[in-house]
Amino acid sequence: MRKLLTNGMWSKLAPLLPAESGRQGPVAKDNRLMVEGMLWKMRTGCPWRDLPEDFGPWESVYTRFSRWCKAGVWRDVLSELQKDEADWEWLFIDSSAVKVHQHAHGAKKNSA
């Protein structure tokens, strides 16, 4: 499975994420593996249930993604990474992931 994060990228991202330990329950999955799964899902646009088994159970990846969203982790990560203006590689928007229905753009509206 091709990974999206280089070691250099991970060295910048890892300190910004919550610790893997400290929660009750089973041993937490590795943050890097979870983030790779999240990135794979976002890049492909697949449903969470179709996440390859290489990333562990899809429920684990989804739960961590959801928990971090609610806790504002991604907002904080983006804020911190934006401070380093020299490294814009972290900030990407792929317009191919946002599809507009063919009738949603430029169609004449029926006004009665």
Image (spheres, rainbow, N blue to C red):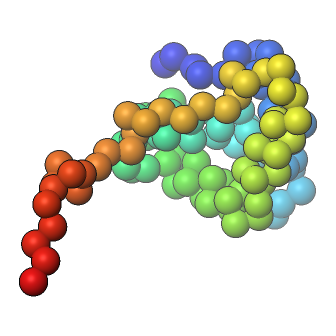
Q: Is 51 on the left-hand or right-hand side of 88?
A: left
Residue at 13% across, 77% down: 111
Quick check: 2 above or below 74?
above
Residue in the picture at 70% in, 16% down = 6
Q: Position of residue 97 (x, y in %)?
A: 40, 39
Question: Where is 45 relative to 74, above or below?
Answer: above
Most extreme residue toward the bottom is 112
Question: Which x, y percent locates residue 72?
Answer: 76, 60
Residue 56: horizontal and vertical position, in percent? 55, 39
Residue at point 24%, 51% (across, down): 105
User: Would you identify the image quadrant in which residue 31 lies?
Assistant: top right
Compared to residue 82, the image places residue 2 above or below, namely above
Residue 97 in sight from this viewpoint: yes
Residue 112 appears left or right of 66: left
Identify the image quadrant of the C terminus: bottom left
Question: Along the line of sight, which residue is nearer the eye, 61 or 95?
Answer: 95
**Residue at left offset 10%, top offset 72%:** 110
